[in-house]
Image (cartoon, rainbow, N blue to C red):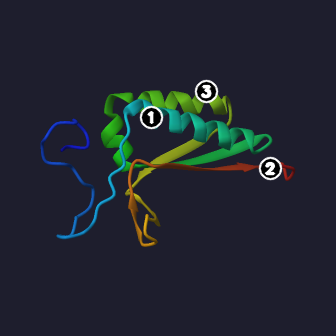
Amino acid sequence: MSIFSGTYEPSAYFSPVPKGIVLHLLTGMPNDLLKATDMLSKDLFNKVRNPAFALIVSCAGRFAYLQKDIPKEQEIIKKQFKDAPFIGFYGYSEQSTLPGGTCGSFCQTIVGLTMSDDLAV
């Protein structure tokens, strides 16, 4: 079943999948990804007083999955950050601990870092 279309078609992967490997497939809809963007941007903005700058790293899987909704993701971040500048780029998956304790790749994630001149948090 295709991750992107929900039909029985070949799936798309962003890195080679070795034969016999166990895959952990995460499901979600574009609105789920946009909700995650909203949660991240609120968290980044609200945890730092007077944010001076933010760095956003979004997985290339999000780019492929969101497609026409990419501008919506940018608007969500702009809404939270108001006049604070931010920059972002697409990465090639993130490494994390998988169920079972092994390390592997996750796709469709978004992470951020907020910086401020204010030392009080």
Mark 1 or 2: in front is 1
For this rendering, which residue is in front, 31 or 98?
A: 98
Q: Which residue shows up at 32% across the image and 34% down it? A: 67
Residue 25 location in percent, x, y?
32, 52
Mark 2 or 3: in front is 3
Mark 1 or 3: in front is 1
Residue 36 location in percent, x, y?
52, 38
In the drawing, does residue 95 fall left or right of residue 56?
left
In the drawing, does residue 43 fall left or right of residue 107?
right
In the rendered image, the vertical position of residue 27 relative to residue 29, given as above or below: below
In the drawing, does residue 87 fall left or right of residue 3?
right
Query: Could you tell me how far apart the alpha carbons at marks 1 and 2 are, in whole angstroms?
Result: 33 Å
Q: Residues within 10 Å of mark 3 (few under 14, many from 20)?
A: few
Residue 73 location in percent, x, y?
47, 32
> Which image quadrant for residue 30?
top left
Q: Residues within 10 Å of mark 1 (few under 14, many from 20)?
A: few
Query: Could you tell me how far apart the alpha carbons at marks 2 and 3 are, in whole angstroms?
Result: 21 Å
Q: Which residue shows up at 19% across the image and 70% down it? A: 20
Residue 79 location in percent, x, y?
61, 27
Q: Which residue is mark 1?
A: 32
Q: Amino acid at mark 1?
A: Asp
Whether tag 1 and tag 3 are in contact, CB under 8 A, the answer is no
In the drawing, does residue 5 fall left or right of residue 84?
left
Q: Which residue is mark 3?
A: 79
For marks 1 and 3, the one nearer the N-term is 1
Q: Amino acid at mark 2?
A: Asp
Q: Which residue is mark 2?
A: 117
